C-alpha cells in the first residue's frame, strides 16, 4: 500500500511543476504546456523539455518581455526571424558592469565605446581584425584620370616646392590633420593611388629623357669616331 501511495505522489509531481514568486505563478504541466499567472492553459503555447521553455504557434512564435510600456519581442514567422524593440530607446548588451555593445534608435551600433557619431553606422572602441575589407567609393572617381591627356601633372619643381613649404604631397592631408581628424580609408587609398600613377608618369618621362640622351651620345660618338 505504501508503494502505491509513493507511486501516486510521484505521478502527481511529474505531471505538475510549479514556481511561485510573490503573486506570480508559473505552472508547467504534462503533456507539455505552460500556464503563467492563470489556472487556464494558454492555447498554442507549449511547455518545457530539456531544451528549455518553448513557445509555439502554427503561424508564428513570439516571446514578449514587457514592463509597462517597455517591451522586447522575439519571434519567427515564414517571413523571417526578428528581434524587436517597439519603444524608442537604445538597446544595450552588457557583461557585468561593462557596456559591451549599444544599438542606437537610428540603427547605429557602438562596440566597446559610448561614442557613436550620427554619420557612422558602426563605431568600435578598439582594434578590428578581418580577413578582407572592401571599401566602396561613393563620390570621388578612381585615379584613372591621371593617365588622361588633359590631366595636369604637377612638375617636379612644383612637388618640391609643396614639400618644402607644406611638408607633405599635393592633395595629401598633413600629419596634424590626420592626428586631429583621422582619415577615411577609401579616400586615402584613392589619393595614394593618384600619387602612384603620377610617380609612374614621372618614371616614364624620365625613361624617355634617358633614351633621348643616349641617342644623342651615340650620335656624338659616331661623329668622333668618323
Image: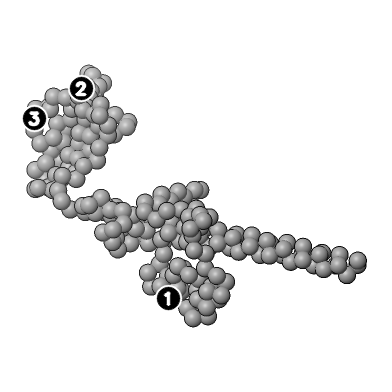
Q: How many numbered markers are drawn?
A: 3
Q: In the rendered image, which residue does mark 1 sit on?
A: 176
Q: Indicate the quadrant where residue 34 lies.
A: top left
Quarter of the image for the N terminus: give it: top left
Q: Is residue 29 left or right of residue 158?
A: left
The nearer-to-camera label among 3 and 1 is 1
Sequence-earlier tag: 2 or 3: 3
Q: In the rendered image, which residue does mark 2 sit on?
A: 58
Between the C-alphas of marks 2 and 3, the distance is 23 Å
Q: Nearer the viewer, residue 218 or 201?
A: 218
Helix, strand or loop under label 3: loop
Residue sitting at 48 percent across and 70 percent down?
170
Q: Nearer the viewer, residue 33 or 7?
A: 33
Q: Is residue 205 above or below residue 6?
A: below
Whether residue 2 appears in this view of the structure is no
Helix, strand or loop under label 1: helix
Q: Residue furthest right?
A: 226
Whether residue 198 appears in this view of the structure is yes
Q: Residue furthest bottom?
A: 165
The nearer-to-camera label among 2 and 1 is 1
Between the C-alphas of marks 2 and 1, the distance is 62 Å
Residue sitting at 74 percent across and 66 percent down?
213
Q: Indicate the quadrant where residue 32 lies.
A: top left
Q: In the rendered image, which residue does mark 3 sit on?
A: 39
Sequence-earlier tag: 3 or 1: 3
Between the C-alphas of marks 3 and 1, the distance is 70 Å
Image location of residue 57, percent across then percent down: 19, 25
Amino acid at each position: 500500500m505504501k508503494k502505491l501511495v509513493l507511486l501516486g505522489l510521484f505521478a502527481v509531481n511529474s505531471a505538475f511543476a510549479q514556481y511561485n514568486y510573490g503573486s506570480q505563478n508559473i505552472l508547467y504541466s504534462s503533456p507539455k504546456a505552460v500556464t503563467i499567472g492563470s489556472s487556464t492553459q494558454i492555447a498554442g503555447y507549449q511547455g518545457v523539455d530539456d531544451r528549455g521553455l518553448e513557445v509555439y504557434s502554427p503561424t508564428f512564435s513570439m516571446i514578449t518581455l514587457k514592463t509597462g510600456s517597455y517591451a522586447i519581442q522575439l519571434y519567427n514567422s515564414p517571413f523571417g526571424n526578428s528581434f524587436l524593440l517597439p519603444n524608442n530607446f537604445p538597446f544595450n548588451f552588457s557583461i557585468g558592469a561593462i557596456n559591451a555593445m549599444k544599438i542606437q534608435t537610428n540603427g547605429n551600433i557602438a562596440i566597446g565605446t559610448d561614442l557613436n557619431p550620427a554619420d557612422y553606422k558602426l563605431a568600435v572602441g578598439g582594434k578590428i581584425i578581418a580577413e578582407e575589407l572592401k571599401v566602396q567609393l561613393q563620390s570621388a572617381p578612381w585615379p584613372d584620370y591621371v593617365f588622361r591627356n588633359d590631366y595636369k601633372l604637377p612638375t617636379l619643381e612644383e612637388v618640391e616646392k609643396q614639400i618644402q613649404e607644406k611638408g607633405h604631397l599635393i592633395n595629401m592631408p598633413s600629419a596634424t590633420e590626420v592626428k586631429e581628424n583621422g582619415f577615411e580609408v577609401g579616400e586615402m587609398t584613392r589619393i595614394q593611388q593618384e600619387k602612384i600613377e603620377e610617380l609612374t608618369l614621372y618614371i616614364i618621362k624620365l625613361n624617355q629623357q634617358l633614351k633621348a640622351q643616349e641617342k644623342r651620345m651615340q650620335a656624338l660618338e659616331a661623329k668622333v669616331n668618323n
